Amino acid sequence: MSVIRTEAPLDDEALVTRARAGDLEAYNLLVARHTASAYRTAVLLGAGSDSEDVIQEAFVKAYRKLSRFRGDSSFRSWLLTIVANETRNLHRSRGRRDGLVLRAAAADPASEVVEDDAVGAVLAGERRASLVQALRQLPVRDREVIVCRFFLDLTEEETVAALGWPRGTVKSRTSRALAKLRGLLDSAEVRHG
């Protein structure tokens, strides 16, 4: 009887340590592990068709600044902070802060509705379109906190790290942004009957 040993996958902390020591394969594993959430973040924060460029730049910057990563937060939230900053830089350079484009369905195919009922699929598409339209109407900071907390499913602590805001600001802005979003969705519901 032979015993097959499988190596436990390394956690991010171990991979960061190895990458700091020059192990490119360890950094490649970090990239592979976090590309999907980095891409989703860039798309949801409005990078649109430039999302791949944004995350590529974010991964390059993260690698260059790996020695500065202190481990106060998770590698994921530190990386998503860099992605968020790169996305903001993109908007600043183009002067398009007001026109964020959300393509949540394209960024996260797993979230697409899979129903046999055609009517159910149409209604789900309309609800998604209403949500995206309402999100676009929110101020930038409200949109950012909603995206982090509910689309990316970041914890409050990860949202604090990603946005660089105090915890109280994240809490209050989340509450106010949700209220605004509900109001926008309720008024859209009334308009469409």
Image (cartoon, rainbow, N blue to C red):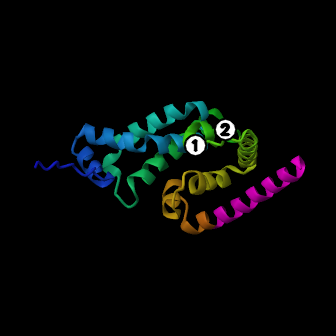
Indicate yes or no whether the magenta region holds residue 188.
yes
Residue 26 is marked as: none
Residue displayed at 47% across by 37% down = 55
Q: Which of 26 and 189 is in front in this view?
A: 189
Q: Does 143 appear above or below 119?
A: below
Q: What element carries label 1?
A: helix
Pointer 1: what residue? 88
Q: In the rendered image, is residue 180 in sight?
A: yes
- Sequence-wise first label, 1 or 2: 1
Residue 80 percent location from the top left of the image: 48, 48
Pointer 2: what residue? 101
Categorize mark 2 by other alpha carbons within 10 Å: few (<14), some (14-19), many (20+): some
Indicate yes or no whether the magenta region holds residue 35.
no
Badge 2 amino acid: Val
Discs 1/2, front: 2
**Left or right of 83 in this view: 4:** left
Magenta residue span: 172-193
**Left or right of 62 in this view: 158:** right
Q: Is mark 2 on a helix, strand or loop?
A: loop
Categorize mark 1 by other alpha carbons within 10 Å: few (<14), some (14-19), many (20+): some
Residue displayed at 61% across by 51% down = 147
Q: Nearer the viewer, residue 122 or 32?
A: 122
Residue 9 percent location from the top left of the image: 28, 50
Give the quadrant of residue 171.
Answer: bottom right
Q: Distance between the residues labelled 1 and 2?
A: 13 Å
Residues under numbered marks 1 and 2 in contact, where contact means CB atoms less than 8 Å apart: no
Residue 4 percent location from the top left of the image: 16, 48
Main secondary-structure element of the magenta-colored stretch: helix
Badge 1 amino acid: Arg
Q: Does 112 appear above or below 173?
A: above
Q: Does 193 appear above or below 32?
A: below
